[in-house]
Amino acid sequence: MIQFRNVSKSFGARTAVNGISFGIDKPQMVGVIGRSGAGKSTLLRMINRLTPATSGQILFGDRDILSLKGAMMRRWQRDCAMVFQQFNLVPRLDVVTNVMLGRLNGHGTLKSLFNVFAEDDVRDALAALDRLGIAQEATKRAEELSGGQQQRVAIARALMQTPYMILADEPIASLDPMNAKIVMDALREIHERDGKMVICNLHTLDTARSYCDRVIGMRDGVLVFDGKPEELTTQAAREIYGADESFNEAATSTAIDAGAPGRSRSAGAMSPAAVAV
Amino acid sequence: MAVAALEQEILSLRKHRQLYSLIGLLLVVAVLVSGYSKANSMNSGGFLQGLSKFFDYPGEIVAEAIDAGPAFFGQILHFLPAMMETLNIALVATLLGGAGAVVLAMASTRNVDSWGPLIPVVRRIMDVMRAFPELIIALFLIFVLGSSPVPAMIAVAFHTAGALGKLFSEVNDNIDRKPIEGLSACGANWLQRIRFAVLPQVAPNYLSYFLLRLEINVRASAILGFVGAGGIGQELRRTIGWGKGAGDETAAIFVLLFITIMIIDQLSSWLRGRLVGSSRAH
């Protein structure tokens, strides 16, 4: 489905991503792990075109997404929804409007400037919020919600885009363990039930093992691990994190991992009641 | 030993600072004295001689207003339409200028992804718009278009667009970029990002500045009446020009102006307080 061919990104003299090549052939849930500054976020942002690549190719099917411009690029951005660490919602707008903003690309500019959304958009937005267990918050301002709730709104916005894939850039890094579990469960459920590809930057090894079908490890902008979660040994982790013998894997764990059902969940198991705190 | 050296250094520094302060003070006094001498030499009657008669004219106005009795309140009502005309000039000009300012601000702020080459151009345009006071623009337009409220509206709107545009662009500079990035990632175009990610953030501060500018423009519109732009200023110029016998009318206009500006000031202060307060509360 998506192929990276020798993709690099430099910020001045600093190389964030250095000639990465790999492919994802089927809708998997892929975890990208590595230390801060390893190039994980840059990798995801290059897919969505938020950050332009310096060189290389990213192919989706036979389409080179790095060459897209203007309306075609924005159409691609709609097709690969992003979920951010800091949610990136519009704080002063209500929750349901925030979710409907995921459909902006499909609407004419003039219509959208007057905040005219179709009844279908409202219905779909509420359905997405309901799926994530926060439909009752639809009329509140986004800034009134907790971090975990805001991240679920961001995921609902991503669902409104009906994307090919969801790119989640450290979606649980700002959340407490309970909310982190809810958000990861939601992403896993979307992957299993809707068959969406999910590429998720993560900081904790156990979260990657619990939720992902495949784990990619990055270090200093280079891919140093690509395998199944069970292949992610302590030795492999040491290489990814550039740590010595004293490396304590538990330090990268959170309470979320203790009870995370993750990949053992059955598809569609998530219900509003199940994710409600 | 080191402490003693430090003490000497601090004392020396303090003496230098005191010397600089004294020189600064002397400079200010010299500028004031020379400025007064120059102004007084150019004043035909002399400033000090005129100062003794400072309260004569206001005294005459007040006396004539008292003599008019209850008819004075009728005078106030008589000038109400002219006051409304001035308010109309101020309101329309602020609305037009405010709308122009939004466009200029959005085109001149890097933080909202304005087109790079356009930013310095629009900023210089705003500098020029701010550089000319309303009075100068109005004088020019009245010469071209003739005496009417329209040149005053254009003049005030022109200056307002430049002044508010600068303030609005500073508001834009301080917004959170995360919502803009969030909508970019959804495939929203620039106008959609401005509408949904920028405007909700800046609206309270924009409205606050808009109301402040409305206050300023009411005063500016009244002054423009003096150069033939209509409204209460034109009436005031007429009554002051007549001198004795029209003092009650002059007093009525002053009272009307004072009440109107006070009401607008209080109303906009209250509204601005609520708007800024509501944006800070969340």
Image: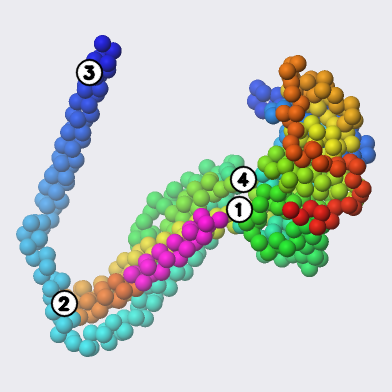
Residue B89 is situated, as x and y percent measured from the top left of the image, at 42, 70
In terms of sequence position, does the residue under pointer 3 or pointer 1 come before the other? 3
A24 with respect to B92 (left or right): right
Same chain letter for marks 2 and 4: yes
The numbered mark at residue A32 is none
Same chain letter for marks 2 and 3: yes
Say which quarter of the image contains residue B200.
Answer: bottom right
Amino acid on which the number 3 mark rests in the picture: Gln
User: Alpha-carbon distance for marks 2 and 3?
Assistant: 64 Å
Magenta range = B261-282
The residue singled out by tag 1 in the image is B198
Which class describes the residues within 10 Å of circle 2: few (<14), some (14-19), or many (20+)? some
User: Which quadrant, please, contains the N terminus of chain B?
Assistant: top left
Mark 3 or mark 1, whichever is nearer to me = 3
Which class describes the residues within 10 Å of circle 3: few (<14), some (14-19), or many (20+)? few
Mark 2 or mark 3, whichever is nearer to me = 3
Q: Residue furthest top?
A: B1
In terms of sequence position, does the residue under pointer 2 or pointer 3 come before the other? 3
